[in-house]
Image (cartoon, rainbow, N blue to C red):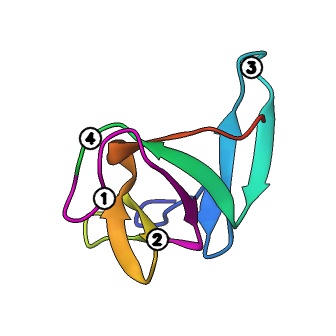
Amino acid sequence: MEGNMIHHYDTYSILVVNKQSVIRRMYTPFEVLCIESIDELEYGASFYVDEVFPDEDDLLLFKIGGNLFAYNHFIITERI
């Protein structure tokens, strides 16, 4: 399987593990909380993720308000 990538997301959903260690698929739009200010997004503000994408290093990006942001600036606030 060398060279094959297994993705845990597609454009409209991601797989997450909840506190009970159960894998769940979350579909967009889902709500996130900004935990680190980035560009015009302020710390502590809530946003809805419209789509998800990989970057050139295969890291997860959230599309919020038409712009792409790295996932690590946010936590998911919806119950999973």
Q: Which of marks 1 and 2 is nearer the N terminus?
A: 1
x, y percent for residue 13 = 69, 64
The amino acid type found where label 3 is placed reads Ser
Question: Which residue in the structure is indicated by mark 4?
Answer: 36
Q: Name the residue under label 2.
A: 64
Q: Is residue 14 above or below residue 22?
A: below
Q: How far apart are marks 1 and 2 (CA)?
A: 10 Å
Q: Is residue 72 above or below residue 22?
A: below
Do the residues bearing badges 3 and 1 touch, measured as CB atoms within 8 Å?
no
Mark 3, residue position: 21
> Bounds of the magenta span?
38-53
**N-term mark: 3 or 1:** 3
Q: Determine the image quadrant of residue 50.
A: bottom right
Residue drawn 35% across the image and 37% down it: 35
Secondary structure, mark 4, is: loop
Q: What element carries label 2?
A: strand
Is 35 included in the stretch rendered in magenta? no
- Check disc 1 and report the residue beneath it: 41
